[in-house]
Amino acid sequence: MTAPTPREPHPWFRGVRKPRVLAHRGFVPRRKADGADADHAEIVENTLAAFAAAHAAGAPYVESDCHLTADGVVVLFHDDDLTRISGDPRKVADVTHADLARIMEDRGGLMTAAEALEAFPDLRFNLDVKAAAAALPLGRIVAPHADRVLLTSFSDRRRREALEAARTAGGFPATSAGQATVARALVASRLGRAALSRAVAGIDALQVPERVGVLRVVTRRFVRAVHAVGVEVHVWTVNDAGAMRRLLDLGVDGLVTDRADVAIAVASGRPH
């Protein structure tokens, strides 16, 4: 596999119409008030069932998170510990893959990064490196699938480590910016195209919240500036249809959402 040229979009982007819908941690269908969706009651995020539901709903992209178990397996799991998901206070890093799989078997099914990439060959993955120890093994895992993987992290250091590991193994994933790079891009977007181009060198997408406290990140001016240097803007985590339409009217390219069903419906009504 060869590195995409700077003039071409990475394969992760090609062949999918905008606006892009990224199913945040997969898709967990909402349980109806009358209990009709009782089968979904125990399904949680970042599981086999959640990814399958996202795929079935028609989401082309799944966003997920990567941790490393005590025995060195990269698993798709958001939190540092198991408290929120199972009431178990242990850290993911202190639990073996087998133990975690047993805990998750009635909650939708644990997935490793390798299993997810093999099980869903039609999905494109947006993988967030949550644990520093997961960066190098994750990079090696995604290398053979790099045309349909975007690597990211709040930490630019972890993101770069995962990218370098993938490239060393012969793969060239897409990437979005960490927090420090996003901050530089926000400043640079007001200083001109040359400054912004330097700030986002090597970046394919800026994945950002609409706001950080009182600071509005996503504005029409910001989106236009980022587009001018060949980078996309994806906004997280957007679950309200009205907010989706408003952001798309500003020109954003993608929506990271817990409500893939709603986002797909909104996106289908937009001109391409």
Image: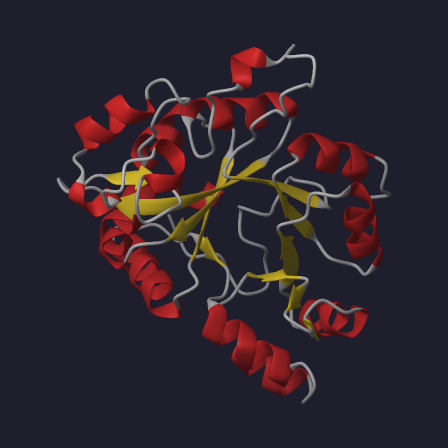
Return the residue found at the far left: 71
206 lies left or right of 80: right
Residue drawn at 39 percent across, 35 percent down:
85
Q: Quadrant of residue 15?
A: top right
Q: For residue 82, say whether it is visible.
A: yes
6 lies left or right of 211: left
Q: Quadrant of residue 158?
A: bottom left
Image spot of residue 207 (x, y percent): 58, 59
Q: For residue 201, say whether it is visible.
A: no
Along the line of sight, the residue nearer the viewer: 106 or 118: 106
Along the line of sight, the residue nearer the viewer: 172 or 264: 264
Image spot of residue 137 (x, y percent): 23, 48
As drawn, 225 above or below 255: below
Q: Quadrant of residue 211?
A: bottom right
Image spot of residue 221 (x, y percent): 78, 74
As drawn, 194 above or below 146: below
Image spot of residue 180 (x, y percent): 47, 75
